[in-house]
Image (cartoon, helix red, strand yellow):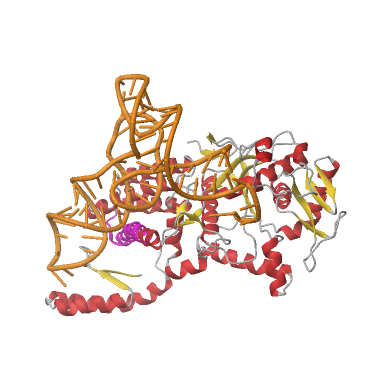
Amino acid sequence: MTLRVHNTMTGQTEEFQPISGSRVGMYVCGINTYDDSHMGHAKSAVTFDVIRRHLVRKGYQVTYVINFTDIEDHCIERTIKLGIPLDQLTEKYIGEYHKDMGRLGVKRADIYPVASHHMKEIIGAIQKLIDKGFAYESGGEVYFDVMAVAEFGKLSHRKKDEMLAGARIAVDERKRSPLDFVLWKNKKPGEPFWESPWSEGRPGWHIECSVMSMKYLGESFEVHGGGSELVFPHHENEIMQSEALSGKPFVKYWLHGGLMNVGSEKMSKSLNNFFTIKDVLKDYDPMVVRFFLLNTHYRKPIDFNQKALAEAAQALGRMQNTLDAALAALATAPEGRDDFGKVAAEAVEKFDAAMDEDFNTRDAIASAFEFSREVNKYLESGATKGGLEEVIKAYRVFDEILSIFKFEKVGQEHMLAPLMDIIIGIRQKARAEKNFKLADEIRDRLKALSIVLEDSADGPKWKVL
RNA sequence: GCCGAGGUAACAUAGUGGCUAUGUGGCGGACUGCAGAUCCGCAUACAGGAGUUCAAAUCUCCUCCUCGGCUCCA
């Protein structure tokens, strides 16, 4: 099966083919390290986590890089306001990021470069751009000379003259052209700064990504990702800089995720309509949040609201119930095999095919739901050990990508198990004596403790919500 | 204004020339002491208009509407 990916550069869904061999370099724009991450950041992290997982499943050797931007207006503002060194702020929010994303089942990237730790390389790159005639100094600042490059707007499909005609570009007399963007900025009083040949100051926003991605992945690499709001100007400028530096094509596939909306408006810090990951995880299981994020194709926007999360909880619970039942049945099922393995293999095939079509997690999840229904029927019709093992194996494949299932009872449930055996024993006695009032009371009181008790054909089952 | 992504049943999402979708919710049935879980069934779809085609939700054109980008942003 061949993997197809939607490339922003061409606007097409294309067959995925690494530049050479089976190595894949993947760079994704991470966060600015001045505050807790919100659900929009979670969407991005989970999206590219899944993309990375699927590339690995396809057998590619992926080197995954996510950067942290710590030299930027908000970070500088925050470090001044709190009166702490930039490094300390950076470290704190990198830690928080890893904590939050870790809870959401996001696997660690291979490398997490930090902008302020690459100052030497950044300054070197700017100097090289000046030497090659792609940048110029003006009053202690350095600008990229957009008119010096032949290709403009490759990614965002814009033309220079159209951009110049656009009304929203601020004029700055230090720039030769309004389209030029800053590579090195003068410091302002009280701001952290670095020494450079041009002034005491700091780099512009775009150059760090060019420098760090090429440092760790080479001058040309396969995948560059981020939220769709980064297409212009950030990624567009990255391409111009990088290709001006190397003289080679920068990135083969540009992948952009849809944004998180709140009531059809973009979730963002500046609109102050954001929900932090920490806040959301107070009310919802991390796996539910992850499911919620993956239940829409990554390139589409998702509207964040309580109803959608509650629905996600219900829907994921349905599949988890099936998995729980299959795991429980495994202990008591008769030895032997049957041909349910075929159904499981087909489900996995369908799942993989969906993932191969531009990482269509929504479609992949649909096939997992269909499979769950088949498994429920199979469980009722008398499953064998061999068949159930195939079932569990299929869920493990789904989870390799989605990472939304629980295969083992958590510690708390282990502790409760002997106690629950006693309570259930008493209740079963009451039921046998048709003392339903007592039986129902036990069930209700357990429910008040978030322990759900359900009678089934195979006897009572319980779980902690 | 320019560039991009969209408008699918009550709601949320897939699909993208013939196969009628997945979940949530609703209704009916099976099972159950009841509840729940599960299974089976039912209803409600492709923004509007024109065109191409034996055949259009899917292709073409036009219109309307939504969102994003053009400024810090995942």
Q: Residue at x 61, y 66 (%)?
A: A35
Identify the residue at horizontal 78%, vertical 58% (top origin): A202
Seen from the viewer's position, the closer of residues A456 and B68 is B68
Q: Of helix, strand and loop, which mostly describes the magenta segment? A: helix
Q: Residue B30 occupies which quadrant of the picture?
A: bottom left
Residue at image coords 51%, 38% = A3
Q: Position of residue A312 (x, y in %)?
A: 38, 58
Q: Is residue A256 above or below residue B57?
A: below
Left or right: A424, with A4 as reference point: left
From the viewer's perspective, is A358 left or right of A32?
Answer: left
In the image: residue A461, left or right of residue A273? left
Residue A359 shown left or right of residue A416 in the figure: right
Is residue A398 located in the magenta-colored stretch of the structure? no
Of residues A109 and A34, the one nearer the viewer is A34
User: How many dots with numbers?
Assistant: 0
Which one is nearer the viewer's eye here, A365 or A433? A365
- Residue A324 in the magenta stretch? The answer is yes
Residue B56, percent across and down?
A: 32, 30
Q: Position of residue A21 (x, y in %)?
A: 63, 37
Give B68 or A251, whichever is nearer the viewer: B68
Q: Confirm whether residue A336 shows in the render.
A: no
Image quadrant where one finds the C terminus of chain A: bottom left
Q: Read off the magenta span.
A: A313-336
Residue at the outermost right position: A197
Q: Is residue A85 visible to us here?
A: yes
